[in-house]
Image (spheres, rainbow, N blue to C red):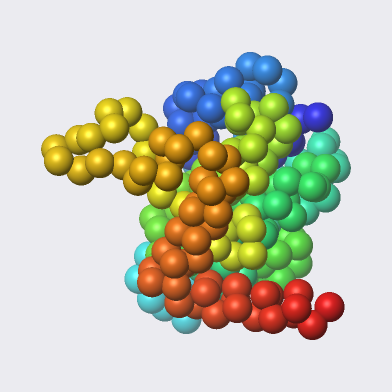
Amino acid sequence: MSLRVDVVTIFADLMQGYLAGSMLGRATAAGLLDVGFSNPRDFATDLHRSVDDGPFGGGAGMVMTPEPLAAAIDDVRERRAPERVVLMSPAGRVFDQQVAAEYAALDGIVLVCGRYEGVDERIAEHCVDEELSLGDFVLTGGELAALAVIDAVARLQPGVLGNSKGAVEESFTDAALLEHPQYTRPREWRGHAIPDVLLSGHHGRIAEWRQQQRVERTRLRRPDLYARYQTLIGEDHEH
């Protein structure tokens, strides 16, 4: 099964290099990932193919005008029939691993990338299904955020990761816990040895140690996630 993603952007070239490399490039070559692009400029009707204008009410910067953007979205809807159209926006719900899993189960998504000071609000109100944010910060445009979403969602597709267990054992996938520490050769590096339990060959003890590390690392580094974990554990005990 292929993950189908369409990106509405005026800067597809900023994304194509990343998508062609490493894991995502191999996934595309194997038919596991299908990313298409739609440029709002192709739907502009003026001589200069304009996609932005000054904001009503005054203010700095430019705002992406609604019609070229809406026409590009409509075109993708007609051609690809996506299940979800998403506007990358700092005003949206925050993207996390649970949202990545939600998107991975969909039959096609569209990621709409704004630029300049953002997009006309009528796009958010009438042309997309939801808005999505990477967090409480502002980027120059939505392309970098869209790449993060594609990367996170693609690696959940069967066959994309070399080790099928990788996506299951990572941070945030199990009861909101961070991933356990990872080590590789050499056994000792600059006077620092790896934990003895990892050399024991005892899979049960290794699994127990890793789970302990996940809980403790989450408690120290992400108290918010640890509180959620405690809540989930309490709910499990109740049932």
Rendering coords of residue 190 (x, y %): 14, 38
Rendering coords of residue 10 (x, y %): 52, 42
Residue closer to the observer: 187 or 151? 187
Q: Quadrant of residue 3?
A: top right
Left or right of 173 on screen, residue 188: left
Residue closer to the observer: 100 or 127? 100
Q: Residue at x 64, y 64 (%)?
A: 175
Residue closer to the observer: 147 or 97? 97
Q: Quadrant of residue 44?
A: top right
Q: Residue at x 51, y 46 (%)?
A: 206
Instruction: Name the quarter where the N terminus is drawn.
Output: top right
Q: Residue at x 60, y 78 (%)?
A: 230
117 up-or-down from 71: above or below: below
Rendering coords of residue 18 (x, y %): 46, 31
Instruction: Name the quarter where the C terminus is drawn.
Output: bottom right
Task: Check the image and name the residue furthest to the top.
Answer: 29
Rendering coords of residue 188 (x, y %): 23, 35
Q: Is residue 115 visible?
A: no
96 up-or-down from 8: above or below: below
Q: Residue at x 63, y 23 (%)?
A: 28
Q: Is residue 57 visible?
A: yes
Could you tell me how many numbered marks the image carries? 0
